[in-house]
Image (cartoon, helix red, strand yellow):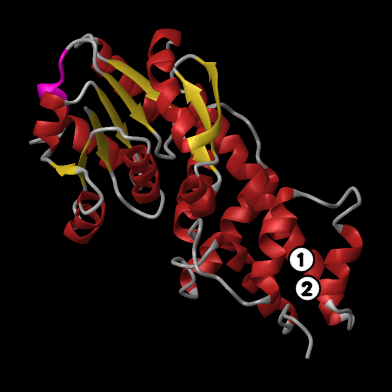
Amino acid sequence: MIGFIGLGIMGKPMAKNLLKAGKELMVYDINPAAVEAVTAEGAKAGTLQEIGQHCDVIFTILPNGAIVQQVLFGEDGAAPALKAGTVVCDCSSVTPGESKSCWKKLKEQGVGFVDAPVSGGEPGAVAGTLAFMAGGEQKDFDVLKPYFDIMGSSALLVGDSGSGSVTKLANQVIVNNTIAIVSEAFVLAVKAGADPVKVYEAIRGGLAGSAVLDAKIPMIVERNFTPGGKISINHKDIKNVINTAHELDVPVPYTAQLFEILQSLKVHGHMDEDHSGIVQYFERLADVVVKKMD
């Protein structure tokens, strides 16, 4: 049986895709409605201890590293019930140090641990096209690979424990800085009187084209900030980038500025919006809105 802990925006569709593939699932979330939504499609509900006791493979996808530590090692957590040979896979976006801490503690129990954060947002989770970036031991990755193939379109073992989390941080630097630069550029274009849809169509086939441009400009011009990837999650991830970079003595000047942009969006109440909503920071500065023209 597979355990699945965390049934939020990402976890719920990931769990449902495992069920659709015929896998037997035991699930846990602090939100009863989320559990009910998945058990209605055939999963069993369980406590953290029951998941630890009955499941040979366990996936977690949770808001931050502290919560991952709590569900595994806290009071009533899953870890004490885990059997040797079990493999735990954390798909949360956390720091490399937090991942290595989990790996070390579980290794002492004879339990495998792989950090495998994902890219693709809610659309990728629903479609089963997520990209898994993994850190850990090859034997544990091999156990997980069939499940990665159900939930995603790619999975790569990057290196030892923590490598997946490092890769996710790099991914978030690129994605969020790109959204910010795209936002700044389109605010300029609109302030100058250009139609943002036509600007997008003109540049998307050239060197400025990107997956980020294609995913976010249609949302921005429609003023659709329904979250696939919340600003709050990206705010947390970028904070993790800065903290990790400082530990490694790596200057990250662009990303430090990006964090302050996200901090401003937090102050103005945008944390539960999609990260395409980063555009609103630049719109406020220039007193303009990037939207379809009448």
Q: Residue at x 63, y 43 (%)?
A: 173
Quadrant of the frame with the C terminus: bottom right
- Give the total number of marks visible in the rendering: 2
The type of residue carrying mark 2 is Val
- Per the image, is 23 magenta? no
The type of residue carrying mark 1 is Glu
- Per the image, is 81 magenta? yes
Measuring from the top left, give residue 276's x and y in whole percent.
Answer: 61, 64
Dot 1 lies on which element?
helix
Q: Does the rendering let one see residue 116?
A: no
- In the image, taking residue 168 as reference, residue 50 lies left or right, namely left
* Range drawn in magenta: 78-83
Q: Are marks 2 and 1 in contact (CB under 8 Å)?
A: yes
Dot 2 lies on which element?
helix
Mark 2: few/some/many CA within 10 Å (<14, 14-19, 20+)? many
- The part of the image, by quadrant, that contains residue 72 is top left
- The part of the image, by quadrant, that contains residue 3 is top left
Q: Residue at x 24, y 10 (%)?
A: 85
Residue that mark 1 sits on: 184
- In the image, taking residue 22 as reference, residue 281 lies left or right, namely right
Mark 1: few/some/many CA within 10 Å (<14, 14-19, 20+)? some
Residue that mark 2 sits on: 187
In the rendered view, would you say 97 is above or below 290? Answer: above
- In the image, taking residue 274 as reference, residue 173 lies left or right, namely right
Q: CA distance from mark 2 to mark 1?
A: 5 Å
Q: Nearer the viewer, residue 260 or 217?
A: 217
Measuring from the top left, give residue 272's x and y in whole percent.
Answer: 44, 67
